[in-house]
Image (tube, coloured by chain):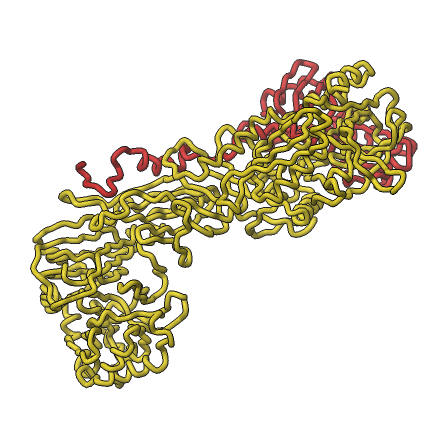
Chain colours: A yellow, B red
């Protein structure tokens, strides 16, 4: 009997209310509609939900999109909401690109991977990086105001800037020295004097370091470039290796610099030196040798230069080489009237650094290693050849984080001017240069003058919207190598929104945590969109669905990004992943799902069915399927669209034609999950069951499930959607179980019920094994 | 199964009536009153609130598995003009409406004068002799009044589910000052001279 015929028959029988209920169903809940004999071709809303995957992985620079809503494990693109490059002067090149790229609404749990052209890039803590691209991920949940641009952290090198570490990579020195504010040595002489006179020698210091700190695997650590080291330490801190193992503590750091021939640190006192557990090792033997021969530098630090300015020179190419110390007067370093003048004009083998301003004279930089300059909280405005004197004494010892050295040092005089950070900080800056391994003559050669000026940005107070998950991206165009000439497009593998979880049948969690359980996602969506309170959910039902989803292997990983979608469709897309339904009854939201082995809730027989109200129907063949295709997003294949097909050959033969139905269920992300849903779809639309007289077991019958409608009295007012009723009626060949699809209560106390047949075999394979 | 008691329906012949509650807000969205009406024959009291008996009819209240938006039409006749005026001076629409069904045993002796005037006091009925169920919970969609009649349509909560999802757009005000930066052609000179 066709559905239309059934309707006609039912209408003739006088039961119009129940069929009216059937006819007024919206086309949303796919399985529910199949159970009602409706084919899901008209799921336009759901189609739009399902077709967002292309845009989902793109880097968008449009403002015509929605801010995505991310649940569960997904790969997503981003939308650029702010970007900028360095401004230029005199035709110089913009090296650096800065961008804020929004991933989604609210707080997401984590970014697991960032991929460029399908390849995951290196992850180091919260920083993801390649040689030319660095990405920091974050989120903001301040309820009232958004985050300010100046407070967004950009990372501009490949390493974790919150730790101090050293590493030699392919012959190139990489390091980071994490600095915290310390005494203002320039302006607070008492603070400087607070460091006691040293009573140990530098030799002892390094012996101690050698014995106690250096790891066994020296090669994994810094191999010193065989240069001089100048220490100026104002603070204590820790040094870690790249494995994040603590290697040392109390490293005095503040201002430090490297020139091609030596690395310079400054430290103020023996006390810090004693605890200096430096790892300039790699070429440990060089150091050991030199230390043994340390008379040339022993004592140069402390007694004579009581603030501990040290300069060490070493050569790493020949073990017979030596480490020498070229001590400088700390007083000169701290006496602004003298030291500035002195160090402002550095010569070939000198490299002066003080108070955030650096002037370097390089005569022939191309013969030397080039270094990296790390500047925290400042932004390089321009780099150009210039002959001005950029020294600004008033900026002496600003309380800034300035990591030096170094950078690409083209020939000339470099000046780095810094201004205090704090509320004005904007960027961390990296200038990269080549690194030459051979330094033939330890001399700089002549060149022109170049200038780097670093200053704050007056746009730094831009407010970014509240409650967005974003990445702060820095990309670098390596103009010297003509490398990285095209911006990387990033995709992010993320664990989506943190949400309230269902801990019991009475309460939701007070704290939000990550979950991709569909029941918990539904709660979050209803609260997010409609603002219902915790106590307006029937948590017993929700908890049951949560547990069943876990038992059946159903989860939901989905991104809502398309336009033209409404809340109903979005929630329906989640319901699809576990055959769920949601409705509002007795003042609470209730969540139900198709469950196997669900017991009968009520028995209803002829006596309790209002006479003349009972009707039964089957859908027309054109509305049924013998082949189900489920399109989903396969997280095991780079989160790309995938498809699975479940077909019943026996049905195809008997139908003499393939009847194909396709579902787009983006919330499904594994093949096994998709197969389960497809199989249940197919079984539920085509099979009934009955008791096998020989075996006494329920067996599948090749009969489409029945739909019934009837009216009953308020005696059954406890019934609700997705309850199982066992109906015994003269019109039925046997007592059958039905799943309630709709209920209508009239003012007179009549309850009109429509229901679809419920069979245990819907959840089993042809071989009788449970699918879920 | 709903979690409601089956006291009356399992043991007794059952009678029932309905309580209709309309939340009324001022034009600033503040709750100012709740209109309470019952299709019972006399004033009814429940939860210490009184429901006024009026000739009230309403459609069947539907609940289905497909999240469809069902609507209920309510007609209230023989209303005093003062009540009709409430609909003009306050805002009914988009406020919540509840229809609660009270089941009771008609064979029980109920003191209808416990309040000093004819009143069906649900609170006085022993808990084992009554069942209470919220049958419908919706939002008032439209409202019309005459001198003696009020009619309104109540949408189920699914009506609000037609709103867009997701609900934040990059062109909304919260992003405007930032997006402008992106929108400006030539704002980004990455990898090239500015004067190109």
In-image side of A519 versus B123 (left or right): left
The percent position of residue B99, horizontal first and vertical second, equals: 72, 29
Q: Nearer the viewer, residue B100 or B84?
A: B100
Image: A36 above or below A666: above
Residue at 31%, 43% in the rendered image: A487
Residue B185 found in image quarter: top left
The answer to whether one can see residue B143 in this image is yes
Give the x, y percent position of residue A641: 51, 38
Where is residue A247 drawn, in percent x and y? 37, 73
Name the residue nearer the viewer: A293 or B38.
Answer: A293
Task: Depth check: give the residue in front, B166 or A156.
Answer: A156
Q: Is residue A173 above or below residue A426?
A: below
Q: Is residue B69 visible?
A: no
Nearer to us in this view, A324 or B111? A324
Q: What residue do we see at 63% from left, 43% from top? A: A519
What is the number of callouts on the image? Answer: 0
Is residue A464 shown left or right of residue A768? left
Q: Position of residue A424 (x, y in %)?
A: 28, 51
Quadrant of image for the C terminus of chain A: top right
What residue do we see at 18% from left, 65% from top? A438
């Amino acid at each position: 009997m066709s559905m239309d015929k059934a309707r006609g028959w039912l209408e003739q029988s006088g039961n119009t209310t129940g069929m009216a209920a059937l006819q007024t169903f919206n086309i949303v809940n796919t399985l529910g509609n199949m159970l009602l004999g409706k084919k899901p071709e008209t799921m336009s809303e759901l189609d739009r939900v399902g077709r967002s995957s292309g845009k989902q992985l793109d880097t968008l620079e449009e403002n015509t999109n929605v801010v995505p809503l991310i649940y569960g494990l997904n790969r997503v693109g981003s939308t650029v909401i702010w970007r900028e490059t360095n401004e230029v002067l005199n035709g110089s090149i913009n090296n650096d690109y800065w961008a804020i790229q929004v991933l989604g609404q609210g707080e997401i749990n984590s970014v697991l991977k960032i991929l460029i052209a399908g390849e995951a890039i290196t992850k180091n803590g919260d920083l993801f990086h390649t040689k030319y691209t660095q990405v920091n991920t974050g989120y903001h949940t301040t309820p009232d105001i958004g985050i300010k641009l100046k407070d967004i952290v950009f990372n501009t090198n490949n390493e974790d800037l919150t730790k101090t570490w050293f590493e030699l990579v392919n012959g190139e020195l990489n390091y980071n020295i994490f600095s915290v504010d310390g005494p203002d040595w320039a302006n607070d002489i008492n603070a400087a004097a607070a460091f006691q006179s040293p009573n140990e020698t530098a030799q002892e210091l390094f012996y101690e370091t050698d014995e106690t700190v250096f790891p066994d695997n020296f090669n994994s650590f810094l191999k010193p470039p065989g240069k001089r080291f100048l220490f100026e330490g104002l603070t204590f801190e820790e040094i870690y290796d790249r494995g994040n193992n603590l290697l040392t503590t109390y490293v005095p750091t503040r201002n430090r610099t490297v020139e091609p021939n030596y690395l310079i640190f400054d430290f103020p006192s023996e006390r810090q030196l004693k605890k200096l557990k430096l790892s300039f090792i790699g070429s440990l033997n060089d150091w050991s040798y030199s230390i043994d021969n340390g008379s040339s530098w022993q004592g140069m630090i402390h007694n004579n230069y009581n603030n501990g300015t040290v300069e060490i020179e070493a050569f790493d190419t020949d073990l017979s080489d030596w480490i020498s110390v070229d001590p400088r007067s700390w007083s000169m370093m701290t006496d602004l009237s003298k030291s500035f003048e002195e160090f402002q004009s550095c010569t070939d083998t000198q490299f002066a650094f003080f108070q955030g301003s650096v002037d370097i004279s390089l005569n022939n930089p191309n013969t030397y290693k080039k270094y990296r300059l790390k500047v925290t909280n400042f932004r390089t405005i321009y780099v150009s050849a210039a002959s001005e004197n950029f020294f600004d004494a008033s900026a002496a010892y600003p309380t800034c984080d300035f990591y030096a050295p170094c950078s690409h040092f083209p020939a000339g005089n470099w000046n780095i001017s810094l201004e205090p950070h704090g509320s004005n900080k904007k960027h961390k800056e990296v200038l990269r240069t080549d690194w030459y391994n051979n330094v033939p003559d330890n001399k700089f050669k002549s060149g022109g003058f170049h200038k780097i000026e670093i200053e704050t940005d007056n746009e730094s107070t831009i407010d970014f919207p509240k409650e967005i998950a974003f990445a702060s991206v820095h990309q670098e165009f390596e103009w010297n190598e003509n490398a990285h000439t095209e911006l990387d497009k990033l995709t992010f593998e993320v664990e989506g929104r943190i949400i309230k979880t269902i801990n019991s049948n009475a309460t939701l969690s007070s704290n939000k945590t990550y979950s991709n359980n569909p029941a918990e996602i539904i709660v979050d969506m209803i609260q997010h969109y409609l603002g219902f309170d915790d106590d307006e959910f029937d948590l017993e039902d929700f908890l049951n669905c949560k547990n069943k989803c876990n038992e059946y292997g159903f989860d939901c990983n989905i991104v809502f990004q398309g336009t033209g979608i409404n809340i109903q469709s979005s929630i329906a897309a989640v319901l699809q992943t576990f055959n769920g339904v949601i409705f509002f009854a007795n003042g609470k939201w209730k969540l139900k799902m198709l469950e196997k082995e669900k017991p009968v809730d009520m028995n209803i027989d002829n006596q309790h069915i209002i006479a003349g109200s009972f009707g039964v129907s089957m859908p027309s063949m054109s509305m049924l399927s013998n082949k189900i295709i489920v399109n989903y997003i396969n997280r095991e294949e780079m989160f790309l669209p995938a498809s699975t097909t479940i077909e019943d050959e026996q049905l195809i033969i008997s139908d003499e034609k393939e009847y194909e139905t396709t579902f787009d269920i983006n919330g499904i992300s594994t093949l096994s999950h998709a197969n389960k849903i497809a199989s249940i779809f197919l079984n539920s639309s085509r099979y009934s069951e009955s008791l096998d007289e020989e075996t006494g077991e329920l067996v599948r019958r090749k009969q489409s499930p029945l739909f019934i409608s009837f009216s009953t009295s308020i005696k059954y007012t406890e019934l609700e959607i997705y309850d199982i009723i066992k109906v015994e009626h003269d019109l039925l060949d046997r007592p059958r179980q039905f799943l309630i699809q709709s209920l209508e209560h009239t003012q007179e106390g009549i309850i009109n019920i429509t229901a679809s047949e419920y069979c245990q075999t819907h959840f089993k394979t042809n071989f009788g094994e449970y699918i879920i | 199964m709903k979690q409601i008691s089956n006291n009356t329906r399992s043991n007794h012949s059952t009678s029932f009536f309905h309580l209709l509650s309309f939340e009324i807000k001022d034009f600033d969205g503040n709750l100012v009153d709740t209109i309470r009406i019952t299709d019972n024959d006399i004033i009814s009291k429940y939860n210490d609130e009184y429901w006024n008996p009026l000739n009230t009819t309403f459609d069947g209240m539907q609940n289905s598995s497909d999240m469809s938006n069902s609507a209920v039409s309510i007609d209230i006749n023989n209303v005093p003009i003062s009540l009709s005026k409430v609909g003009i001076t306050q805002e009914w629409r988009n406020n919540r409406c509840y229809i609660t069904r009270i089941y009771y045993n008609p064979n029980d002796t109920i003191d209808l004068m416990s309040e000093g005037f004819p009143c069906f006091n649900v609170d006085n009925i022993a808990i084992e002799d009554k069942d209470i169920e919220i049958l419908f919970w919706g939002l008032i969609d439209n409202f019309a009044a005459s001198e003696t009649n009020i009619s309104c349509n109540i949408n189920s909560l699914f009506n609000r589910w037609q709103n867009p999802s997701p609900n934040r757009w990059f062109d909304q005000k919260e992003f405007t000052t930032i997006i402008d930066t992106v929108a400006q052609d030539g704002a980004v000179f990455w990898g090239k001279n500015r004067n190109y």
